[in-house]
Image (cartoon, rainbow, N blue to C red):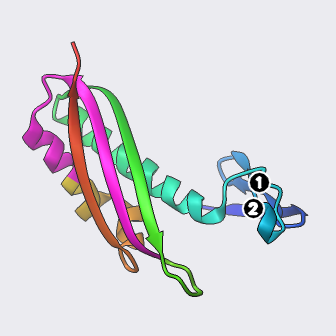
Amino acid sequence: MKASVKWVEDITFMGETGSGHAMIIDGPPDHGGHNRGMRPMELLLLGMAGCTAVDVIAILRKGRQEVTDCVVDIAAARADSVPKVFTRIHAHYRISGRALKEGQVRRAVELSAEKYCSASIMLGKTAEISHDFEIIKTG
């Protein structure tokens, strides 16, 4: 896996992944940025949310659960001093579907957190990670 960032101006960068996807990374004006893109630490949280969501959907589909939607909301706290690592991260899963079994949803979330989600496991080296979920019935 590869990625690179190219400086644009001030603290604005263009990031590109080895798979050919690009995005702007920037900071707030009070740090010399122009607020044109996501902050690097926001990208880490987004990566964790995406990683665990992929796991949960895959596990539920494998278990023949009829999932119609999955939203993972992430909230984090950071250390007050440099390096301002994440100290706490909470993931709240909102899983929608028809006749979803609570036990299977719980197992999918736990398997992702404890075994499959590389991002969660890596961030868990510095942060206390917690999670919960809700099931939203459709149809």
Residue flagged by tag 1: what amino acid is it?
Answer: Asn
Disc 1 crowd rating (10 Å Cα; few below 14, some 14-19, many 20+) is some
Where on the picture, by quarter, is residue 27? bottom right
State whether residue 109 is above or below residue 68.
Answer: below
Of the image marks 1 and 2, the number of the one nearer the N terminus: 2
Tell me the SS state at disc 2. loop
Q: Is residue 136 magenta?
A: no
Q: Residue at x 56, y 87 (%)?
A: 81
Q: Are marks 1 and 2 in contact (CB under 8 Å)?
A: yes
Side (left or right) of 71 relative to 7: left
Q: Position of residue 39 (x, y in %)?
A: 66, 60
Side (left or right) of 121 relative to 9: left
Q: Nearer the viewer, residue 38 or 63?
A: 38
Q: Nearer the viewer, residue 82 or 98?
A: 82
Tell me the SS state at disc 1. loop
Numbered range of the magenta stretch? 86-109
State whether residue 63 is above or below residue 42.
Answer: above
